[in-house]
């Protein structure tokens, strides 16, 4: 997984309170995302009603700019509100975890002026996904609070250096235990999220709700669920509410693969999103192919408008 590609078949769902007073103010920032897309639109961009949409882009083979090529026909608003660079890795050097960028991810970051800024100029937030890399290092097995904080510092430094809008956690492919690494513990991810939120009080932190990290969001009475801006279901072509302590406006129970989920399912999942009062719709694997007709199958339901492709 060094190149960051993945197959999205999911067989096991892992489950994830009370937030400590020390992080109450920070949690207030994290929960500040308003309940409608129109309220979340940056000044100067077209208004959008209904849930927001998220697009993961496999940058090994696709351009991030694809996320900015779709608009709603009625308003001109962006179809995709958050674009996720998939994916950087958490690697292991024999003694500690470190943040790794494969050549394709590094190229996107080095060329942020042409690969990221155009999206941000449209009002699209750009996050960096962090994924395991079969080396034993993961978000759930830091040996100490200081080790978790050190990795959080690497993440926040990357956000600052490359002008990103946030970090997305995806606890897959860590292969906990290899290379003499530890198995998951109860405190590691809690410490990591706390440290990252403290370092990035006004940036996005999102959770791809899978893996041991997602199952350990509470430690000694501290629940870090409210420190996330959003959490989404990782199982494509399903509707499953993430077990994270966030309001419905910040949850994505519906998830689709843009290259394999039937349009009828995409529309049905969008309807469940609207009917349930949820605020986010997750999509994966946006490519360069013009699929505005397919995308319209869910934007018609979510946002009351067809999608158009701007090229």
Image: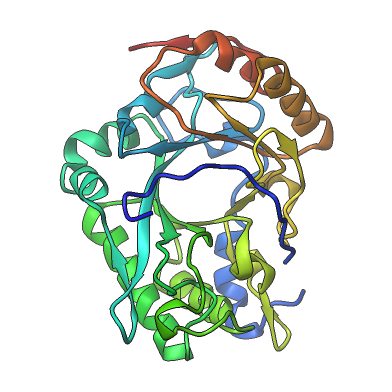
**In the rendered view, does 266 fall on the left or right side of 197?**
right
| Image coordinates for residue 9, horizontal then vertical, percent | 61, 43
**Vertical placement of residue 261 versus 166, above or below:** above
Q: Quadrant of residue 262?
A: top right
| Image coordinates for residue 282, horizontal then vertical, percent | 59, 37
**Vertical placement of residue 250 versus 282, above or below:** below
Q: Which residue sits at x=56%, y=42%?
A: 8
**Vertical placement of residue 295 versus 232, above or below:** above
**In the rendered view, does 239 fall on the left or right side of 153?**
right
Q: Which residue sits at x=76%, y=48%?
A: 241
Of the pair 198 and 244, the residue shown nearer to us: 244
Q: Which residue sits at x=73%, y=85%?
A: 221
Of the pair 241 and 163, the residue shown nearer to us: 241
Quadrant housing the C terminus: top left
Q: Quadrant of residue 39?
A: top right
| Image coordinates for residue 230, horizontal then vertical, percent | 60, 52
Of the pair 232 and 122, the residue shown nearer to us: 232
**In the rendered view, does 177 fall on the left or right side of 95?**
right
| Image coordinates for residue 244, horizontal then vertical, percent | 71, 60
Colour setup of the view = rainbow
Q: Is residue 23 visible?
A: yes
Quadrant housing the N terminus: bottom left
């Amino acid at each position: 997984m060094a190149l960051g590609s993945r197959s999205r078949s999911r067989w096991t769902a892992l489950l994830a309170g009370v937030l400590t007073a020390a992080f109450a103010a920070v949690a207030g920032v994290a929960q500040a995302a308003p309940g409608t897309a129109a309220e979340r639109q940056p000044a100067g961009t077209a208004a959008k009603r209904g849930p927001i949409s998220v697009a993961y882009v496999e940058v090994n083979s696709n351009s991030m700019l694809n996320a900015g090529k779709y608009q709603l026909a009625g308003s001109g608003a962006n179809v995709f509100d958050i674009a996720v660079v998939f994916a950087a890795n958490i690697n292991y050097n024999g003694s500690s975890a470190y943040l790794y960028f494969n050549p394709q991810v590094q190229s996107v970051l080095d060329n942020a002026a042409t690969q990221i800024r155009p999206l941000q100029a449209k009002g699209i937030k750009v996050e960096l996904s962090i994924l395991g890399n079969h080396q034993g290092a993961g978000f759930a097995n830091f040996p100490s609070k200081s080790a978790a904080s050190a990795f959080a510092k690497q993440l926040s430094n990357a956000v600052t250096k490359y002008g990103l809008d946030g970090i997305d956690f995806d606890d897959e492919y860590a292969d906990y235990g290899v290379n003499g690494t530890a198995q998951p513990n109860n405190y590691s991810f809690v410490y990591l999220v706390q440290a990252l939120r403290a370092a990035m009080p006004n940036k996005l932190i999102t959770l791809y709700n899978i893996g041991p990290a997602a199952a350990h969001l509470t430690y000694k009475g501290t629940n870090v669920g409210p420190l996330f801006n959003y959490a989404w279901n990782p199982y494509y072509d399903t509707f499953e509410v993430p077990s994270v302590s966030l309001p419905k406006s910040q949850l994505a129970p519906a998830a689709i693969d843009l290259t394999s989920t039937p349009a009828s399912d995409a529309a049905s999942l969008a309807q469940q999103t609207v009917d349930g009062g949820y605020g986010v719709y997750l999509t994966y694997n946006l490519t360069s192919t013009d699929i505005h007709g397919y995308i319209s199958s869910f934007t018609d339901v979510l946002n009351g408008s067809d999608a158009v492709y701007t090229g």
